[in-house]
Structure formats: structure tokens, C-alpha cells
Amino acid sequence: MRLNLLHPNTLNKYASKRKVKMIELSASIFSFIVWRSGEKDNNMRQVLNKQKQNIKLTFLVLFVFLSLWAGVEFTHGFGAMNGSSKTSPILKNADKGKFSVLTYNIAGLPQIISSAKTERAESIADIGQKLNQYDIVHVQEDFNYNDNLYENGNLHPFRSSTKGGVPFGDGLNTLSKYPVTDIRRIPWEACTGADCLTPKGFSYSRIEVAKNVFIDFYNVHANAFNHLEAAAARRQNIQQLSAYIKAHSFGNAVVVMGDLNAHYSFSYDNIRELLAENHLEDSWIFLKHNGNFPISVMQLPDNDILKLDDQSETIDKILYRSSSQIQLNPSDYNLEKYLFTNLKGMPLSDHNPVSVTFSWSLENTIPEMSAAIDNMQK
């Protein structure tokens, strides 16, 4: 599932169109469920799996339909930061430093329709605590359990305000130890299937990692599934994201993190174009794949993403670029499949989070300026 926050200038028009599409999809999915329920299947395991899927789909369809019937409207707003009561850092003048980042699809759909195997409220509360190890975090599918994520031991002083659960939020949130400004949420213009039942998209923000040192961050959740129609919508997502980066982050250092649902190795995806058009690098390719893209094939990617290791390409990616003022250098790429587990060793989500550490330095810093900065800090 994917959700997008709505830009105030286009919200009313978008919400109206989205409602129509949601109603149409609800009717289509319900008809599909009824039709499938009449099919015979000699394999009892397949029957049980289909019944479980039908229950989940029916619940989602009814939830969306009843919400729309009640006349609930989308609200304006960029999703401002929710400064927590935790102590905020005092930023210092600096010409170099480092910060850690992590991206994580936390599977925050309602328990009855979640594909994660562990209990959602408890697992997401655990995730919130474990995120404290990282300076800047992007989460996706943060829908119905945001209070569990934020209010059970998470210590990040800067956290984006949730836009709500299914079907009204976009599931995208940022947690940071550094000040976050100018956060915006942009919905996708293209979607397919169940992805259209929520306002998915990407968010943009500027994060101040030292005094007057800003980096543009993008939190992304692209269209799911790999059939041709879904892949076509995802290609449009990537094109929309690329155009936005060109228009709003020109000349800036950039970090793009999120569940892109795309593979370099899948010929129907266009993730390479995103990198080429915006001079982005992939931290996994740079640190784990010798700087080389995987071979692109038409074969469908493996759906069992929990069994991947950090030598494997994952749909959860961390991309970056330097600018003429700020040099970014990644290190310590990790697929954090062991840290984010419960006491029984079960994954806390249906994705593994990905982390990277970035070192940064100001370019063209003359020795006299560095000395002046040092003196100011004494």
C-alpha cells in the first residue's frame, strides 16, 4: 500500500478525483472477490490462502467505502514537523561531519490486512525504540500505528506529523536528530490497484546537519507489484520524482531514501534514469556491487525480500549526490535484518531496513575559514 500527502494548491481537485477512483476500485475489487469466491480449487492450502486474501481485501474495501460514504475530506497541509519534547541538539559551525541514515517500510497497515507476521502495535513500538541508533530515518507505511512508533521510547527530537491511517495518510514520515524544514508531501499522478486506495507518493524536506549546512532529503514509496500495468505506473512515479528533484533541488546535495519497489535488474523499471538524470549514486552499488549495475532481465524479481542479504539488490534504496558546496561520502551499508527482529527472531516488518553512514565536508573551504570556524567554537 502507498499513500501520498496532498499539496494545498491541488488538494481539492486531487481529492475529488481520488474519491471517484477509490469508489470505482472498491466496486471492482468487491466484484472480483465475489467472482473468485465461486471458483473451485482442489488444493486446500490454496483455498485457505485465497480466503485469507479475500478477507483482507473485503475489510479494506468496506473500510474505504464507509469512510467515503461518511463524507470524510482530505485536509490541507504540508505535514509540518512535530517537534517532540526531547532535547534538540545545538548546531555548531562545522566544515565536516557525519550522520547515519536508515530507511524502513514498517508495515503499518491495519493488523487484519498487514502482510507482516508479527503483531503490529507491539512490533512498531519496538521499531520506534530501535530507530534511536540512527540520526535520520525515513519510514514508509506508517499508517495506523504512528502513536506506537512515536510514543514508546523513540527519542528523535524532530518528527514529521502523521497524516493519518488508511486511507487518508501517505505513510511517509521523517524522524531526525537534526532540524527539519520545508517538508512537503507530493502524491503520485499514476497508480494501479490497491495503491490507488491511499494517497501515496513522496516527501521532500531540508535537513540542517550543521549550522547553515542543508541537505535535501526525499522519502519515497513507489507503486507496487511487477505486472505490466503496475510497472508502467511505477515508471511514471520515477519520472515524476525525477522532475521534482530537477526543479526543487537544483545545485543541492541530495539523499533519496525509501521503498522504490524498483530493481535495476528488472527491465521494466526505469530507476537507472532517475540516477542518470539527477547525477545520483546508489550506496549499495558503490559499496557492495563494485560500482556496477546488475544485469537487466525481463524475469520477475524474487518477491521474498526478507531472505535477501546486503549482497543482494533490494527495493529499499539509499541514493545520494554531492553538490559544489557539500561532498557526501557513504560508508557502512547494512541490510539490518538481525537488529530489527523480536525476541523470537522474527522480522518486525515485511521489509528489512537499510542503513548507511554519510561523511560530509564543505568544498572549497580555505584554511583561513577553517581556522575562523575553530576559533568561533572555542
Image (cartoon, rainbow, N blue to C red):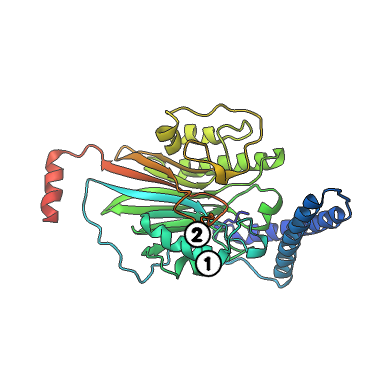
Inspect the image, locate mark 2, and give the three-letter code of the amino acid beneath it: Asn
Residue 213, x across and y down, in percent: 29, 50
Q: Earlier in the sequence, mark 1 or mark 2?
A: 1
Tag shown at residue 342: 2
Q: Nearer the viewer, mark 1 or mark 2?
A: 2
Residue 258, x across and y down, in percent: 50, 48
Residue 364 vertical position relative to residue 156 in the rendered view, above or below: above
Q: Quadrant of residue 159?
A: bottom left
Looking at the image, can residue 112 be seen? yes
Left or right, 291 with respect to 371, comes to: right
Looking at the image, can residue 77 be seen? no
User: Which residue is at 59% across, 60% downward?
Assistant: 11
User: Which residue is at 65% across, 60% downward?
Assistant: 15
Residue 289, x across and y down, in percent: 45, 31
Left or right, 368 with respect to 293, comes to: left
Q: CA distance from mark 1 to mark 2?
A: 9 Å
Question: Under tag 1, what secondary structure?
Answer: helix
Residue 220 vertical position relative to residue 331 in the rendered view, above or below: below
Residue with the mark numbered 1: 122
Q: Compare residues 212 and 335 and report the one nearer the observer.
A: 335
Question: Under tag 2, what secondary structure?
Answer: loop
Q: Compare residues 221 and 199 and report the one nearer the observer.
A: 221
- In the rendered image, the quadrant that contains the N terminus is bottom right
Inspect the image, locate mark 1, and give the three-letter code of the amino acid beneath it: Glu
User: Which residue is at 56% across, 41% downward?
Assistant: 238
Q: Quadrant of residue 121?
A: bottom right
Tell me whether the residue at label 1 lies in contact with that at label 2, contact meaning CB atoms closer than 8 angstroms: yes
Left or right, 330 with respect to 238, comes to: left
- In the rendered image, the quadrant that contains the C terminus is bottom left
User: Which residue is at 35% across, 40% downward?
Assistant: 331
Q: Quadrant of residue 155?
A: bottom left
Q: Compare residues 80 and 192 and report the one nearer the observer.
A: 192
